[in-house]
Amino acid sequence: MKNNLQASELIVENDGSIYHLRLRPEDLADTVILVGDPGRVPLVSSFFDSIGLKRSNREFVTHTGLYHGQRITVLSTGIGTDNIDIVLNELDALKNIDFSTRHIRTGTHRLRVVRIGTSGSLQPGIPVNSFLLTRKAIGFDGLMHFYAETPRHADTAFAKNLMKEVDWPEIWNTPYVFDADKELAEKMSGPDVIEGITISAPGFYGPQGRMLRLLTADPSMNRKIESFVSPRGEKITNYEMESSAVYGLSRLLGHSAVTLCAIIANRVTGEAVEDYQPLMERLILHVLNKLTV
């Protein structure tokens, strides 16, 4: 990898901030909570003891503050793995590239990244109003195939087995699969947390099997995914839209990452939570307290 980055590759604003996030290196804590919704950032930071930074640009809203004496950044990513590509690369750059010289630093400054999100269950036994920790994330979007190191770190065997068992169409993106950081996942786990395998879909409607006025290319895909069992006896548990890129990019860049989602719908039973704000607040507190133990 080249060590000197051109201005077109690493765009730094006149105030020393990075292009999309508009953050300077000193603005970012080593522990980062990612949320999709910009409105969820002030919800998370409302539990902080103090807030030292508030910054926003486009859908990227950032608060950095203290919780139980630990410095934490909460940042909104917007929806989708394309946004995660921006966020994870720029977070890494803030810690691991010298903006004044445009040189990549020696060694890796490691971040702890926890995504808090909402999700729909694909198994009847995973109820709404529960918490789910993603041990393994499956990307249906193709993003990580653009990075050279992906084949060395991804769970290619799992992806191939899934494609075979669900009769994956050749014209669709080849799925990629990455695991959560084991140590961080253990820290975030608990007796009230279900663990599972999550699909990150490249859309909310067709890619997750929803049909409004348009039929999906394979209307039976959700049923096949629900029935899938890996050679190790694992089942796919839920849909969301970001974790595969969070896990993949974090693994390649040398960071720790895990996702916890509030289950607000069950795609099998048809149930959905009308007001999931109290559920999200409980999940936020769970994450904050686990991070600071």
Image (spheres, helix red, strand yellow):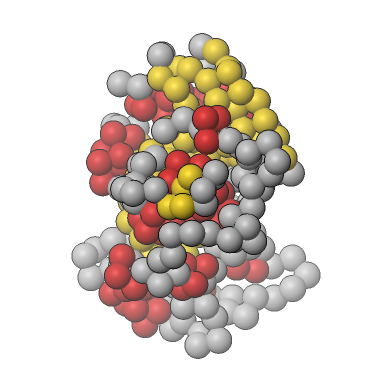
Query: Which residue is rendered at x = 28% and y = 34% of the image?
Result: 187
Question: Could you tell whether 186 is left or right of 8 in the image?
Answer: left
- The residue closer to the viewer here, 202 or 229, is 202
Query: Which residue is rendered at x = 48% and y = 59% of the image?
Result: 4
Going by the picture, which residue comes out furthest to the left?
A: 232
Q: Provide residue 2's location: percent of width, then percent of height.
A: 44, 65
- The residue closer to the viewer here, 38 or 205, is 38
Question: Could you tell whether 284 is left or right of 80 in the image?
Answer: left
Q: Provide residue 53's location: percent of width, then percent of height.
A: 61, 23
Quarter of the picture containing the N terminus is bottom left
Query: Which residue is rendered at x = 65% and y = 68% of the image?
Result: 206
Q: Quadrant of residue 114?
A: top left
- The residue closer to the viewer here, 98 or 257, is 98
Say if 155 sits above or below 277 in the image. below
Badge count: 0
- The residue closer to the viewer here, 255 or 241, is 255
Whether residue 54 appears in this view of the structure is yes
Q: Provide residue 280's location: percent of width, then percent of height.
A: 54, 31
Quarter of the picture containing the C terminus is top left
Q: Quadrant of residue 86?
A: bottom right
Going by the picture, which residue comes out furthest to the right?
A: 213
Query: Which residue is rendered at x = 47% and y = 26% of the image?
Result: 72
Going by the picture, which residue comes out furthest to the front?
A: 101
Q: Provide residue 60's location: percent of width, then percent of height.
A: 66, 41
